[in-house]
Image (spheres, rainbow, N blue to C red):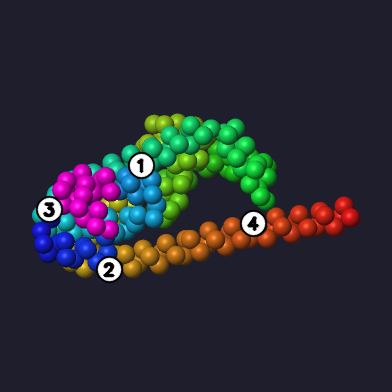
């Protein structure tokens, strides 16, 4: 990676990401994306367009950037699928039952929803910040067909990654512009998730209070 690229990338990308791409090229971008799946706070919206920028500067081929970042996404997702498979349904229910305001029936409804909508959730979940990592865990818990999970994850990841790698490639030194748009998208998604959790807690506390008054 040349000095110009290091200077442009240094403002937004964690130093170790720049170092991986500098040392390994496209495989380094793939490793960074695999780690992003395991540790969601690492932003793919920085890694992917930066890989596209690197390709535009001749540091790696565009095809290699697309293939390696998609491979990294799949490897990271499979690791989390394995975590869910090891955890298993019974252990998941047992852990959830110990959480305040969470009932076994909540887990069973979630399980039923995933059995019905799992393929769509895995595919489209790959395009939603944070959830694209988390969706792999329930897929493992429910022992979703591994070939199906891998196929859907590959397709969803390839679509998401291609958009951002190509954006970085097209924008060149202005690749950081991509992060602003995705940051807004991420905040909207997370805001909706927070509101959903708050609504769940309010409903659950309200019902618990009503039950106490009736018993009294």
Label 1: state its secondary structure.
helix
Residue underneath mark 4: 200
Label 3 close to label 4 by CB (< 8 Å):
no
Q: Nearer the viewer, mark 1 or mark 2?
A: 1
Question: Mark 3 or mark 4, which has the lower sequence index?
Answer: 3
Quickly name the residue at label 2. Answer: 177
Q: In front here: 156 or 50?
A: 50
Q: Which residue is mark 3?
A: 59
Q: Is residue 137 magenta?
A: no
Magenta span covers which residues? 14-32
Q: Is residue 202 left or right of residue 135?
A: right
Mark 2 residue element: helix
Q: Earlier in the sequence, mark 1 or mark 2?
A: 1
Residue 151, how many percent across, how many down?
36, 37
**Distance CA(mark 2)–CA(mark 3):** 20 Å
In the rendered image, residue 27 lying in the magenta stretch gets the answer: yes
Q: Which residue is mark 1?
A: 76
Asked if the residues shown at circle 1 and circle 2 are in contact, with their CB atoms under 8 angstroms apart, the answer is no
Q: Residues within 10 Å of mark 4 (few under 14, many from 20)?
A: some
For mark 4, give the secondary structure. Answer: helix
Q: Residues within 10 Å of mark 1 (few under 14, many from 20)?
A: many
Q: Residue furthest right?
A: 216
Q: Quadrant of the C terminus?
A: bottom right
Give the CA distance from mark 4 to mark 1. 30 Å
């Amino acid at each position: 990676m040349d000095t110009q690229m290091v200077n442009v990338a240094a403002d937004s990308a964690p130093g170790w990401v720049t170092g991986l791409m500098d040392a390994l090229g496209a495989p380094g971008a793939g490793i960074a994306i695999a780690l992003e799946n395991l540790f969601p706070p690492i932003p793919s919206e920085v890694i992917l367009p930066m890989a596209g920028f690197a390709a535009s500067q001749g540091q790696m081929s565009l095809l290699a950037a697309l293939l390696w970042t998609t491979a990294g996404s799949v490897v990271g997702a499979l690791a989390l699928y394995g975590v869910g498979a090891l955890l298993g349904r019974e252990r998941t229910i047992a852990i959830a039952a110990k959480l305040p305001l969470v009932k076994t029936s909540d887990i069973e409804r979630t399980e039923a929803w995933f059995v019905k909508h799992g393929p769509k959730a895995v595919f489209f979940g790959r395009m939603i910040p944070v959830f694209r990592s988390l969706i792999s865990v329930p897929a493992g818990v429910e022992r979703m067909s591994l070939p199906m999970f891998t196929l859907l994850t590959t397709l969803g990841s390839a679509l998401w990654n291609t958009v951002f790698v190509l954006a970085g490639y097209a924008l060149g030194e202005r690749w950081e512009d991509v992060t602003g748009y995705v940051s807004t998208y991420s905040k909207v998604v997370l805001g909706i998730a927070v509101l959903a959790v708050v609504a769940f807690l309010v409903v659950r506390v309200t019902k618990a209070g009503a039950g106490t008054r009736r018993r009294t």
